[in-house]
Amino acid sequence: MNYKLNDIPERPVKPREKGLTMVMDKGLSLRQVEDFIEVAGVHTDIVKLGWATSFVTPNLKEKLALYRSAGIPTYFGGTLFEAFAIRNQFDDYRRVLEDFGMEYAEVSDGSMDIEHDKKCEYIRTLSSQVTVISEVGSKDAAKIFAPYKWIALMKAELEAGSWKVIAEAREGGNVGIYRGTGEVREGLVDEILTQIPEETIIWEAPQKEQQVWFIKLIGTNVNLGNIAPAEVIPLETIRLGLRGDTFDYFLNKGK
């Protein structure tokens, strides 16, 4: 930090297991990636190349190399995995991960139906090759899961080998753990946290109000995902009580 302030919450140093900021890259250019790393790389734990944007992204290997040189892991969005899976090209997907030197992969079923035992099989297989992040929840706003089902799915996927489970919200933050308005399904989140350790969950929270809500509920070092590149610095100030939304929240904590 550039100067000293008292009563600033402690953030673990990278690489860290909690307090993760997962950023959504929806098509940054190489120059934009360089600028992003210069400004926000120190606060970014992992970058997702959204859905299947990697299929059409120019200079993909060069982009991945930029993130790698900055020590920021990357992975392809879960929709790309699903695009391969629905075409019975899972082995091809594994080869793509290998060809591009990927160390992480996302397994999701937000756009297609996959029997959960089969999804866990995909996780087990991929976890022998890469670090797996799996996503729970549908991209279809009409599909609303009961809390017990979220819990059961998350437990099974962690047991199958997922490093973290993502609570689905899409890039808009208006499905899954949120209502269509973006409001948090508070009862759902509370129920999930009775059974699933908070450090194993990445909560997709693209909207500022959602980020504030989770930071106030779980604390500075909650795992948050689908953060826009331009919102990484603002999010870090919210985590540290240096924005109006959490300005007095961490003052004199523990005293």
Image: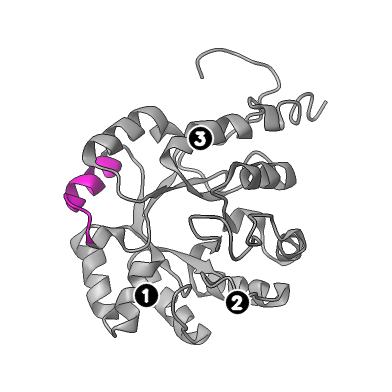
Residue furthest to the front: 181
Q: Is residue 244 above or below residue 196?
A: above
The numbered disc on residue 13 is 3
Image depth: mark 1 or mark 2 in front: 2
* Residue 236 higher or lower than 101, as above or below: above
Residue 38 lies, in percent from the top left, at 34, 28
Between discs 1 and 2, the one toward the N terminus: 1
Observer-nearest residue: 240 or 125? 240
Residue depicted at 23% across the width and 57% down the height: 101
Q: Earlier in the sequence, mark 3 or mark 2?
A: 3
Q: Quadrant of the C terminus?
A: top right
Q: Is residue 128 visible?
A: no
Which residues fall within the magenta stretch? 56-68
Could you tell me which secondary element the residue under label 2 belongs to?
loop
Numbered label attached to residue 82:
1
Tell me the crowding category of disc 2: few under 14, some 14 to 19, or many 20 or more residues within 10 angstroms, Cα based. Answer: few
Residue at figure coordinates x 57%, y 50% from the top left: 205
